[in-house]
Amino acid sequence: MSTTFQLDTSTSRANPTPQPMKRLTVPKIRAHKKGGTVEQPLVMLTAYTARQAQLLDAHCDILLVGDSLGQVIYGLPSTIPVTMEMMANHAAAVVRGSYHAVVVVDMPFGSYEASKEQAFESAAYLLKQSGAAAVKLEGGAQMAETVAFLNQRGIPVMGHVGLTPQAVNVLGGYMARGRSEAEAEKIVSDARALDEAGTFAIVIEGVVEPIAIETTKAVSCPTIGIGASAQCDGQVLVTEDMLGMFERVPRFVKKYAAIGDVIEKTVAQYAEEVRSRSFPGPDQTYQPIS
Ligand code: KIV
């Protein structure tokens, strides 16, 4: 589907033409999995800006304002320094740029782990500031009480198990999880605990395939895989990774394009034309009316 945008100058909102379908809801995403299976896998991508959201929206069920924006947008070494303000501002931009997908915003490190009350305050702030529909938080059974607390107070929660990047200092790196029996059992039981607590979906990241499949079978809500398995109930990637914005990406990323190369070549041509005074040309300059 091809969508064009017209800027409403009174609100600065870019209105799509044709008007896309109604926005999906969290209950609809949850209800996608029936009798332990989905008819069609859910499509999720990260989005951090309004224009990016406009381009992705019609094709995705869920847009995730991931705390991966710390590395992708801000050049930070990990997701640990990401702040609430960063998440709220980018999530608001993504909501403004989308009409169809459910927008989920990551809770940044340190904003939810101390208590369920802290988590409620942070999640409520993120949803109020941005208009997003749900939050995502990392962790397993230890977060189940928090998930239930938020859910009972009107805040839908997406879980995240396996490789949880906010725990990088405990895990010691970003390697795949679930290789030992103990680790595999913990991933499955963590996902079960989150599911029972009411998560509407669970991201399974960087987990060996058989354990990703076992986890998907073990829970009633949809699982969204990243570096997991095609048998998960949906897939997510960091958009900049799959577009080929970076030279180095994790092994599980498929580069669908080489946008980084396109940008470099385009900017090189612009620089050459500026230096040779061939830009701006007659089409880009104003002349007095004769
Ligand atoms: O922050 C993020 O982008 C994520 C996805 C990789 C699932 O959590």
Image (cartoon, rainbow, N blue to C red):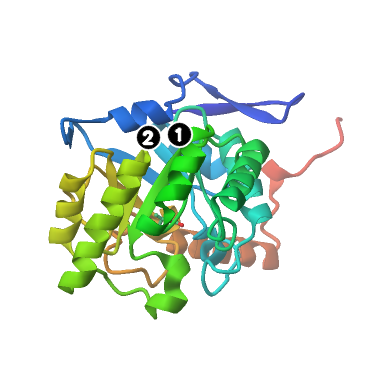
For image coordinates 16% across by 35% down, the residue present is 37
For image coordinates 36% across by 68% down, the residue present is 249
Q: Amino acid at mark 1?
A: Val
Local secondary structure at mark 2: loop
Q: Are marks 2 and 1 in contact (CB under 8 Å)?
A: yes
Judged left or right of residue 229, residue 255 is: right
Q: Quadrant of ligand 1?
A: bottom left
> Residue 286, located in which quarter of the rendered image?
top right
Name the residue that disc number 2 marks: 61
Distance in Å between CA atoms under marks 2 and 1: 6 Å
Judged left or right of residue 20, residue 69 is: right
Vertically, is 125 above or below 187?
above
What is the x, y in percent for residue 4?
A: 52, 28
What is the x, y in percent for residue 241?
A: 40, 60
Q: Quadrant of the C terminus?
A: top right
Name the residue that disc number 1 marks: 102
